[in-house]
Image (tube, rainbow, N blue to C red):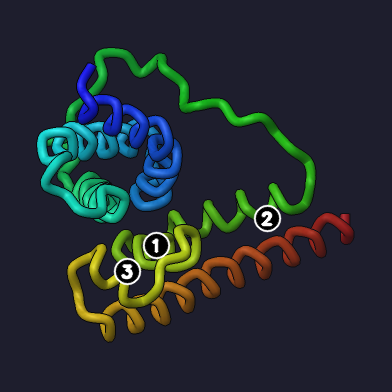
């Protein structure tokens, strides 16, 4: 095996799960996320020696591929022959921090894809405004605006959930 293959294999081993998580948070579907990551990794392998920062390239390409996946009309999407395959199982953890993360993840899925991508890169990946702008190929001002809009949309979704939960709790106490 060549040095190129070994370097690429080590990169994939280290980055597969973080890239898959980033794609999932962007598109909201585990299978589409995996498809996006594998497509990007196949393209990255061909360009491996020419890319200076493969981590940044992979993050940018995965976000774009995941956004494209959400934009693709349903009739052009590939469909599996069997719908019997369940989503990836996650063990249930009753701690409040896990519950809060799940609630935020569900709320993120209700935010538009482009805003979700910015929030994911900024707050979950820890990128700066400049790095996020480079990753998405848009001006820093757009990233700041999208960050503000995305946070506002997320607050609205989470606020609506809190209001609904309080109403349901009041109804349950009345009964």
Residue at the extreme front of the image, as rendered: 3
Mark 2 surroundings: few (<14), some (14-19) or many (≥20) residues within 10 A: few
Q: Position of residue 45 (x, y in %)?
A: 17, 34
Q: Is residue 150 above or below residue 40?
A: below
Q: Position of residue 164 (x, y in %)?
A: 66, 64
Mark 3 surroundings: few (<14), some (14-19) or many (≥20) residues within 10 A: many
Q: Which residue is mark 2?
A: 100
Give SS at disc 3.
helix
Q: Earlier in the sequence, mark 3 or mark 2?
A: 2
The label shown at residue 132 is 3
Q: Earlier in the sequence, mark 1 or mark 2?
A: 2
Q: Nearer the viewer, mark 3 or mark 2?
A: 3
Residue found at x 40% / y 45%: 28
Judged left or right of residue 35, residue 170 is: right
Q: Position of residue 80 (x, y in %)?
A: 26, 19
Q: Nearer the viewer, mark 1 or mark 2?
A: 1
Q: Is residue 83 above or below residue 112?
A: above
Residue found at x 27% / y 81%: 140
Give SS at disc 1.
helix
Q: Which residue is mark 1?
A: 121
Label 1 vs label 3: CA separation?
6 Å
């Amino acid at each position: 095996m060549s040095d190129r293959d070994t370097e690429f294999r080590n990169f994939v081993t280290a980055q597969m799960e973080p890239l898959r998580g980033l794609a999932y948070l962007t598109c909201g579907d585990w299978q589409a996320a995996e498809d996006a990551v594998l497509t990007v990794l196949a393209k990255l392998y061909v360009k491996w020696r020419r890319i200076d920062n493969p981590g940044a390239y992979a993050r940018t390409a995965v976000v774009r591929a995941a956004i494209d996946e959400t934009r693709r009309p349903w009739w052009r999407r590939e469909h599996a022959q069997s719908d019997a395959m369940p989503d990836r199982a996650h063990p249930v953890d009753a701690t409040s921090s896990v519950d809060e993360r799940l609630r935020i993840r569900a709320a993120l899925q209700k935010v538009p894809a482009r805003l979700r991508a910015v929030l994911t890169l900024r707050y979950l990946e820890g990128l700066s405004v400049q790095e996020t702008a480079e990753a998405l190929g848009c001006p820093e001002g757009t990233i700041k605006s999208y960050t503000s809009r995305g946070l506002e949309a997320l607050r609205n979704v989470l606020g609506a959930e809190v209001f609904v939960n309080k109403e349901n709790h009041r109804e349950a106490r009345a009964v």
